[in-house]
Amino acid sequence: MERYSGFSLFKHAFSHHENWQKAWHSPAPKPSYDVVIVGGGGHGLATAYYLAKQHGITRVAVLEKGYLGGGNTGRNTTIVRSNYLWDEAARLYDHSLSLWQGLSQELNYNVMFSQRGVLNVGHNLQDMRDIERRVNANRLNGIDAEVLDTKAVKELVPIINDSPNIRYPVHGASWQASGGVARHDAVAWGYARAANSLGVDLIQQCEVTGIRRQAGAVVGVETNLGFIAAAKVACVVAGSSGVMAAHADIRLPLESYPLQALVSEPIKPVLDTVVMSNAVHAYVSQSDKGDLVIGAGIDTYNGYGQRGSFQIIEHTVSAICELFPVFSRVRMNRSWGGVVDISPDACPIISKTMIKGLYFNCGWGTGGFKATPGSGHVFAHTIAKDQAHPIAAPFNLDRFNTGHLIDEHGAAAVAH
């Protein structure tokens, strides 16, 4: 099979897609689609792929206002795990993890999924009690999980500072051996190429400016390239879901925040697993290129800026350097921010709306990347059947009216 990289891949794909070429270069109206997906990130591209692959719906267009995978998909720390506390979240993330394990073969594209394990470190007695509770819940749900003491953590990560006298002493950790990392842009390109090969149109530089409705149902979207007719519209625009919902006169229970991360200069391999700290919301792994990938927490203010407050990065770096003194002389290469939307219970919304043919997938907070395959899989089912996939059913919009919240605040081993 021929190989393509970067935009040459899509230039090749589009040049062989006769229908799209005609629609783009002729003055004729844009083609009518069965489904228009707004958002060309990992979740949107995965949804398009599973619509075509699993449900035979190939009259699909993915609209992206920038370039594919250029939003939060390309602005995250690539961690994959499923050790969530509540049953509903655990099922969703473990479903995703099972798809990750065969994704490179499924897409015939190396997404560089590396099951190197994930440590969630505890720094005090309450942390360890929470870890034991979560590990027990994981085991009841068939998820691999283990409680480690300080000695076991040190054996796994020899460079960690296990002194009892530091600001955040390591009292132990939870360990999920099946967790790990993947290559964020490879996931986007893999799903994009696979979806395009099944007939899905991938339209970049296409910003949606409105959602057109008639008689209580969607009929298409307004874009900077003109009107695009569609029987169904699925919005997967992390960080901007509230803005998109406003086009349909819907107000979603979401707040958007900047979420920061950084990478160091490349160094020789010293860390072969993922280490996360809930207490300071700092987590670190080492990529195959050698750079340290370090994640921070969300800012305390709402906003859509793709950068955040300096004190968040400063606090994260100081905590990482205390846990790993060897990193104190490593230089930072670059930092960035993504924009995440968070629901009141820190769990996603995967749901159809009161408007016929309109669907939303949003509210992932800090958990979006790891859920990419599972999210796309269950969302595609929800769109195709106009009925929630059993795994997605607890994440519908109605829960905010009924009070059946899931509430993974803190319980997910991450301090949203």
Image (spheres, helix red, strand yellow):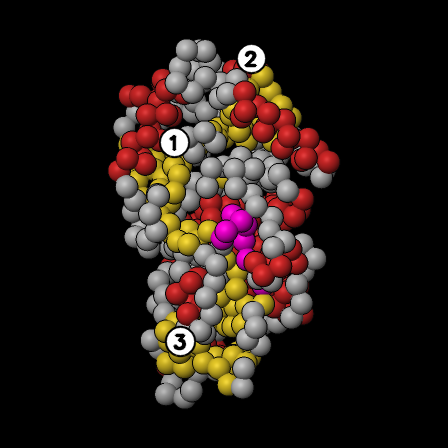
Neighbor class of circle 2 (other Cα within 10 Å; few <14, some 14-19, many 20+) is some
Where residue 328 sits, quadrant-wise, is top left
Amino acid type for the residue under numbered disc 3: Gly
Most foreground residue, 27 or 97? 97
* Residue 262 placement, left or right of 163: left
Q: CA distance from mark 2 to mark 3?
A: 57 Å
Q: Is residue 189 magenta?
A: no
Q: What amino acid is at disc 2?
A: Lys
The percent coordinates of residue 251 (x first, y second) are: 45, 66
| In the foreground, 385 or 19 | 385
Q: What SS does tag 1 mark?
A: strand
Q: Which region shows up in magenta? A: 343-351
Q: Where is mark 1, residue-wise?
A: 292
Would you call the spot at circle 1 few (<14 residues within 10 Å), some (14-19), or many (20 or more)? many
Query: Sequence-wise, which precedes: disc 1 or disc 2?
Result: 2
Residue 256 in sight from this viewpoint? yes
Determine which residue is flagged by label 3: 210
Element at badge 2?
Answer: helix
